C-alpha cells in the first residue's frame, strides 16, 4: 500500500514546480503584451514575479532530472560524482 502513495507524492513533487513554471511563463507573457494596450507601459512587478516563478520551476525540474541521471550513470564523465581514493 505504501508504493502507490509514494509514487503519488513523487508525481506531485514534479507537477507543482511544473505548474509554477507555467504560471510564471504566462505571467511574463501577460506583462509583456500588456504594453501594447492603451497605456503602453510594461507591468514590471508582474514580469519579475513571473520570471522568478519560472526560474524556480525550471531549476527544480532540471535539478531533479540531473540528480536522477547522475544516480543512474546517464551523465557525461565530467558530471559524475567524485570518488574519494
Image (tube, rainbow, N blue to C red):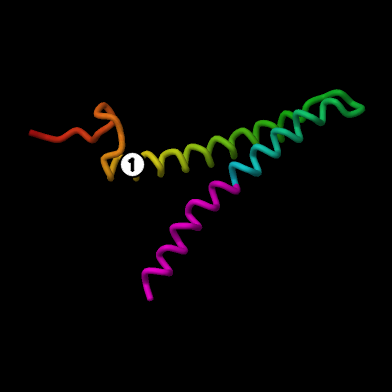
Q: Is residue 70 magenta?
A: no
Res. 32 image quadrant: top right
- Considering only vertical position in the picture, is 16 above or below 39? below
Q: Is residue 16 magenta?
A: yes
Classify mark 1: residues with Cα within 10 Å, few (<14), some (14-19) or many (20+).
Answer: some
Please give left or right for residue 51 compared with residue 39 in the image: left
Assign the magenta stretch its main secondary structure. helix
Quadrant of the drawing holding the C terminus: top left
Which residue, as the protein is rendered here, is positioned at the far bottom? 1
- Considering only vertical position in the picture, is 41 above or below 56? above
Say which residue label 1 marks.
69
**Segment colored magenta:** 1-19
Which residue, as the protein is rendered here, is positioned at the far top? 40
Please give left or right for residue 23 compared with residue 2 in the image: right
Task: Please report the residue visible at 29 percent of the width from the left and 30 percent of the height from the top.
Answer: 76
Please give left or right for residue 67 compared with residue 27 in the image: left
Quadrant of the drawing holding the N terminus: bottom left
Task: Please report the residue visible at 71 percent of the width from the left and 35 percent of the height from the top.
Answer: 46
Nearest to the observer: residue 74 or residue 79:
74
> What kind of element bears circle 1?
helix
Task: Please report the residue visible at 47 percent of the width from the left and 43 percent of the height from the top.
Answer: 61
- Considering only vertical position in the picture, is 10 above or below 5? above
Amino acid at each position: 500500500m505504501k508504493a502507490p502513495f509514494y509514487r503519488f507524492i513523487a508525481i506531485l513533487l514534479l507537477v507543482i514546480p511544473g505548474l509554477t513554471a507555467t504560471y510564471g511563463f504566462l505571467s511574463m507573457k501577460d506583462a509583456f503584451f500588456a504594453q501594447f494596450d492603451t497605456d503602453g507601459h510594461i507591468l514590471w512587478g508582474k514580469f519579475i514575479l513571473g520570471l522568478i516563478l519560472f526560474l524556480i520551476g525550471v531549476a527544480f525540474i532540471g535539478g531533479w532530472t540531473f540528480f536522477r541521471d547522475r544516480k543512474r550513470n546517464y551523465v557525461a564523465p565530467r558530471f559524475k560524482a567524485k570518488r574519494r581514493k
